[in-house]
Amino acid sequence: MKNLSAVLIAPILLASMAMPARAQPAVPAPSSAAWRQLVLGIELGLFPAPGGQGQMQIVRVDARSHPLHVCSASASQPMLTVEEWAAKQKLCLVINAGMYDKDGSTHCGYLKNHEVILTAVFRSDYSSICVFSPLAKEAAPFRLLDTDNAGIEKNILSRYAVAVQNLRLIKHPGENRWKQQPKLWSEAALGEDKDGNALFIFCRTPSTMHDFNEHLLKLPIHLVSAQHLEGGPPASFYLNCGGVVIRGMGSFESGFNETNSSQKFWLLPHVIGVKVP
């Protein structure tokens, strides 16, 4: 298959480097938008960005055949870019695991990776948690859950080896939880569809999160829930699967990096990835 890196990313990098106007309300994507199978269980979807300017990439992963993994920096493992994490850990798909604190390494929400609890604080204001690597035989291989349900910390965390807590974007079964705001940014997000597939979502074109969520809910992807992973320049997405390579680098963020000129991956302390088939 053709390497799509230049085809997909170049139009994004050539976008205006001036501060963009506030994104317009999202419009429905064409119903004919199709998924392209890269390998069995991993599909790529290319969709219009919110406001109709640029393109967003969504990779749909069947976690039953392609389990998700968390990779983290440590005393013996330095931070890497998503592309470097892919090479180091033999991953075909990598995205941010979430925002990190001012120390440059501590994940902002609860983070458990098998026997290691990297961040022990379960935040009440972070209303979404991604769980995978089930410990219970009957548990789904991947879930994106709302944490404002009573007892979820005790009942769910004990059934999964990996848990990643982040800010909620969309509450199950498809409710936009962000009020309109003036701030815009590039976005990396994680979603779940009605069939329990994981959706790796990247959009370099900046938008408000309210408009971003509305746009996602109108796309033909059957989204039921989503969480925010990162915005602006640190937002990162890397795909190298089935002959397709995409390097997605975030750029614009209101009040921080008000240009669309970023063309370098940031070093990240924690990422979510999928192993090379």
Image (spheres, grey):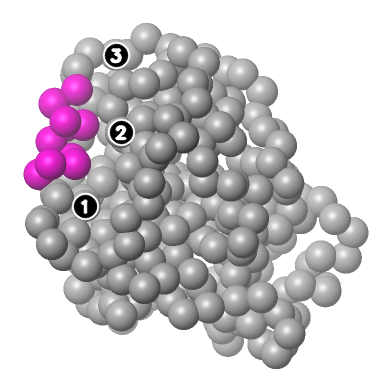
Estimate the spatial distance between the alpha carbons at disc 3 and disc 2, rounded to whole Å.
Answer: 18 Å
Local packing at callout 2 (Cα closer than 10 Å; few below 14, some 14-19, many 20+) is some
Which residue position holds label 1? 246
Q: CA distance from mark 3 to mark 1?
A: 25 Å
Q: Which residue is mark 2?
A: 55
Amino acid identity at mark 3: Met
Element on which disc 2 rests: strand
Viewer-proximal residue among 254 and 78: 254
Given residues 121 and 220, the one toward you in this image is 220
Residue, x 14% and y 50% (percent of image)?
4
CA separation, marks 2 and 1? 12 Å
Q: Which mark is residue 90?
A: none
Query: Which is nearer the N-term, disc 3 or disc 1?
Result: 3
The amino acid sitting under disc 1 is Ile
Residue at the spot x=41%, y=71% of the render? 41
Instruction: Say whether disc 2 or disc 1 marks the residue closer to the N-terminus.
Output: 2
Q: Neighbour class for label 3 at 10 Å: few (<14), some, many (≥20)?
A: some
User: Residue drawn 42% across and 30% down?
Assistant: 30
For the record, the magenta segment spans 6-15
- Disc number lying in front (3 or 2): 2
Question: Would residue 253 be visible to someone looking at this image?
Answer: no
Q: Is residue 163 above or below residue 17?
A: below
Q: Residue placed at 60% from the left, 70% from the top?
A: 142
